[in-house]
Each structure stands twice: as C-alpha cells, then as structure tokens.
C-alpha cells in the first residue's frame, strides 16, 4: 500500500500527500466523504468540507479511509473516452519531433495511439493536465513562454499533455490545435475534462 | 437600481464566492475581507451567503441611488458623504431616490464593502456574482455609468453588530504550518517584518524583504488554498488571496489562520507586515 500522509491545510482544508500513481484511487476514495470538495493534483489531494466547522469530523473520517485499502484504479472502461480531433500543425511540432527523436509522424502517432487520463486541473478554468500518455512524449516546457497562446492549442510539457481552453500566456510546446470547446461557464458541467475522465486524440485534417 | 458615478481605483461586485469548482480550475474567489463583507450584509438585513455587494479598493467610489435604498459601508474606513454631508461608517444609511453617496480615500487599510438591502444584481457565473480577476469569471470591474439592479429588500435592517468595529491597521499575520514547512532552512526566518509589494492583488499578496533560504527545487503541482504562503525561487513569499490559482508548483511553507486571511485583505502596498507562527487551530 502506498504511503499516505494526512495534513491540516489551514483552518478550512486537509491535504493528503501520496505517490502520483495513487492519486486517482485516493480521489475516488475521498470523494465518498459526505459534504466535501475533493481537489486532486499531481501527488496530493485537497479535501475541503463544505462547512469549516466540520474540519475535525472530516479529518477523522479521512483518516479512517486512509487506514483501509484504496479502491482499485478507475479503469478506462469506467468512463467513456472523450474524443478530441486535433490538427497537428503546432509551432513547436518540429521541435518536439527533434527533441523526442520520433519525427513529426512519430509524434502524431504517439499522441493519438494511447488514451490520456485527466489527472487534475489548474492554470485556467477547464485546463486539464493529461497524464499516462506515451512516455516518449515527455518534453520540457519552452525556455521562453509565449505571451499569448490561442484557445484550442494542444501542448506537451513535463510528461503531460494539455489543451488551452482560451487564449492565455503559456509555456507548453504546441503540437496542434482543436475546435473542441473545453470550457463553457453556461453548461451545468462547465469543464469538458474532469479528473478521472479519459481522452483520446485523433488526427484531423486542417 | 444604482448608477456608478465613479469606481475609484477598483470596484468589484462580490459575494461569498463560487466554492466547489477547484477540481476544474476555478478558484473560490469571493469577498477578500469576509468578516467586513458579512458585517455589512447583516447590517442591511441581507444573507451574506447569498447576496452580493461591492468590494471597493482604496475608496474613491461614488454612486447615485435611483430609488430609496438602505445601504451600509464596512471594512476600511473612508470619509463618506451623502449629497455632500458626512455620514457614519459601519451603520445603516437610508438613501432617498437621487441621492449621491461618495467615498473619499482611506488613511489606512485597503478594502471597503458597500452592502445594499436586497443585494446587487449581476449575471451569476457558476452560482456566484463575484468577479474573479485571475480566471476572468463574473462581472467586469465596475466603471462610471454602470447601472446595477437591486433585489427585493428585506423588510427590516439586521440587528446592530454585537461587537464594535475594529478598524484595519493591524499588520500581524498568524501562520500555521504548511505542507512544505520542512523546506525552510530556518523556520524563524519567515517570522519577521516584511513590506507589502505594490505587485499585490486579489490573486496574491507579495512580500518584499530579505530572501528566505529554502531547499532548492519545485514540487509536483499541489492544490492551493486562500492564505497559502508560497515560496518561489526568489525567496520572497507570496500569500494567496481569494482569486488564487487552484494548483501550483512552488512549496507552500505556511498557511494563514482564517482571521489573518481577512487581515491580509487590508494590507496596503508599501506598508510593513509582520508574520508570526501560531499554534492555535
């Protein structure tokens, strides 16, 4: 069983630290707590009771969950794959082809061949860090971030893939673009990609 | 309705925020000094959990009441007039149609709250009317000429507050341990007097001073909370406010107490600010 550490995180929240591989299972387990918000990240999970005065009882309940075996990892069969068509013509595609040694066709093949797991969100509403893709695509961020990256840009950085939900500054290596709407605050569920979902990229014609 | 005549340096529609969306990258946002916001809401008889007011940064705000509205001002004390006559702070003010309420500039402190009985109307986004300056959600910052609707006022004002108002000016922030407190070479180095950087806003308050020595490197992205004290490579702490990013990759070496999170809202750029460890919680 992976080592888990339960900490107070200010007076309103708790933080559970874990190995990155355990975060998805931990998130599922902690979401069974009543009246809490559960926020996963790369190697920790935030647990925030809806009422701050419930912190003590939430801490006790969370400790009980951590003392029992975690549920199995959510598998790809548990959630429908979200298919995202991508036009692979990003400004960093050639650089990524060189960095990885895969060539342009090899990068596209690697990016589309296996599904990516939505690990956690951050940076902007609807921006998802996609993990568990082809490990050969692990490239560093650009040395110089761009001051503006167009909405729908598909990028790679630090072993993750991600899609910019809207125009913003950004330092990821951009390999393509998509028309898929990642964020719509008018929807009941505003983010297309939520932690635990799976994404499959598909090469599309420009 | 009310008509904004001048917004001052920054005036934002604000309510209790939009909790529950951090897992998709949206901060809770909401009033920065929650105690001052709630106090104003209760004074006019509003439900602070539901209704919106205006967060005014560094005074300067003025508006015209287009109907008879019951209002109150709380938080950082500004000189305030109604049609040119001085009126009281932290108290209910009954405005007649057409009257103009105007704020001057506060001597100390930063954020004040205007509450209007019935609450201010603006298009809610994800259940909240708060302006989130980081994510760009919620109403735009107010500008001269903006007209804001007002909800149905409660029949009566709230009870007067049990405790007298303590004006802003206390510059001490209490620290609880954070997930990476162990990264500090000397935990006492953080517990000193800093200067509030002009490069501070609702996302984060930056503190200038002698850089802190910590273990080198970054951490895998970690969830953030209001009041998290992050220590980037510069060694100058950043204390996160209500519009903080939902995750971040620099160590969080401390977290403010709840009360200090409100006090943080009132720190003015350039003023000193003392951090101290507390065992309370």
Image (spheres, coloured by chain):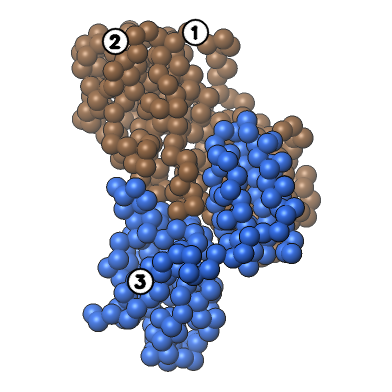
Q: Quadrant of residue A167?
A: bottom left
Mark 1 or 2, nearer chain start: 2
Judged left or right of residue B136, residue A57 is right
Instruction: Choose between A131 and B113: the one closer to the eye.
Output: A131
Decide: marks 3, 1 in contact (CB < 8 A)?
A: no
Taking the spot 57% from the left edge, 33% from the top edge, the residue there is: A51
Going by the picture, which residue comes out furthest to the front?
Answer: A77
Tag in front: 1 or 2: 1
Q: How far is disc 3 from disc 1 in space, using C-alphas?
A: 57 Å
State the residue position of label 3. Answer: A83
Instruction: Provide residue B96's location: percent of width, then percent of height.
Output: 25, 8
Determine which residue is flagged by label 2. B95
Question: Could you say which chain is coloured brown in the image?
Answer: B
| Badge 3 and badge 1 in a common chain | no
Q: In this view, does B262 lie above or below B203?
A: above
Question: Nearer the observer, disc 3 or disc 1?
Answer: 3
- The x, y position of residue B243, in whole percent, is 47, 44
Residue B44 in view here: yes
Near mark 2 (Cα within 10 A), the count class, few <14, some 14-19 or many ≥20, is: some
- Mark 2 belongs to chain: B
C-alpha gap between disc 1 and disc 2: 18 Å
Tint applied to chain A in the drawing: blue
Q: Callout 3: helix, strand or loop?
A: strand
Whole-percent x, y for residue A83 in the image: 35, 71
Q: What distance separates the C-alpha of mark 3 from that of mark 2?
A: 57 Å
Which numbered disc covers residue B160? 1
Identify the residue shown where x is 53% and y is 68%. A75
Instruction: Give B208 or B37, whichever is nearer the viewer.
Output: B37
Q: How crowded is mark 1: few (under 14 residues within 10 Å), some or many (20 or more)?
A: some
């Amino acid at each position: 069983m992976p080592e888990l550490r339960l900490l107070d995180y200010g007076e309103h929240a708790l933080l559970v630290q874990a190995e990155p591989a355990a975060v998805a299972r931990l998130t599922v387990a902690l979401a069974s707590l009543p009246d809490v918000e559960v926020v996963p990240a790369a190697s920790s999970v935030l647990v925030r009771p809806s009422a701050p005065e419930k912190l003590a009882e939430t801490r006790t309940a969370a400790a009980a969950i951590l003392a029992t075996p975690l549920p199995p990892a959510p598998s790809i069969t548990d959630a429908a794959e979200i298919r995202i068509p991508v036009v692979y013509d990003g400004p960093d595609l050639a650089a990524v082809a060189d960095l990885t040694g895969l060539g342009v066709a090899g990068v596209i093949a690697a990016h589309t061949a296996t599904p990516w797991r939505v690990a956690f969100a951050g940076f902007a509403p609807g921006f998802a860090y996609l993990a568990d893709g082809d490990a050969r695509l692990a490239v560093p961020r650009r040395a110089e971030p761009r001051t503006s990256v167009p909405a729908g840009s598909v990028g790679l950085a630090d072993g993750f893939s991600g899609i910019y939900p809207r125009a913003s500054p950004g330092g990821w290596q951009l390999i393509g673009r998509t028309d898929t709407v990642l964020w719509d605050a008018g929807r009941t569920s505003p983010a297309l990609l939520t932690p635990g979902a799976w994404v499959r990229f598909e090469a599309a014609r420009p | 309705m009310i008509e904004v005549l001048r917004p001052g340096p920054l005036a934002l529609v604000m309510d209790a925020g939009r909790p529950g969306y951090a897992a998709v990258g949206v901060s809770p946002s909401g009033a920065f000094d929650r105690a001052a916001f709630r106090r104003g809401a209760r004074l006019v008889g509003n439900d602070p959990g539901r209704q919106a007011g205006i967060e005014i940064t560094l005074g300067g705000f003025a508006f015209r009441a287009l109907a008879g509205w019951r209002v109150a001002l709380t938080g950082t004390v500004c000189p305030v007039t109604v049609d040119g006559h001085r009126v009281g702070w932290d108290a209910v003010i009954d405005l007649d149609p057409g009257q103009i309420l105007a704020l001057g500039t506060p001597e100390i402190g930063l954020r004040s709250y205007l509450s209007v009985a019935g609450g201010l109307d603006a298009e809610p986004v994800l259940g909240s009317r708060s302006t989130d300056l980081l994510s760009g959600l919620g109403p735009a910052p107010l500008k001269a000429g903006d007209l804001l609707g007002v909800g149905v006022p409660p029949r009566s004002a709230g009870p007067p507050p049990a405790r007298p108002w303590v004006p802003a000016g206390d510059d001490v922030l209490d620290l609880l341990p954070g997930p990476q407190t162990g990264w500090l070479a000397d935990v006492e180095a953080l517990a000193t007097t800093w200067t509030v950087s002009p490069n501070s806003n609702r996302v984060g308050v930056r503190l200038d001073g002698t850089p802190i020595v910590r273990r080198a490197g970054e951490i895998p992205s970690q969830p953030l909370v209001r009041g998290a004290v992050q220590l980037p490579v510069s060694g100058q702490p950043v204390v996160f406010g209500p519009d903080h990013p939902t995750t971040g990759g620099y160590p969080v070496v401390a977290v403010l107490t709840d009360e200090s999170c409100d006090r943080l809202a009132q720190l003015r750029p350039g003023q000193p600010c003392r951090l101290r460890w507390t065992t309370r919680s």
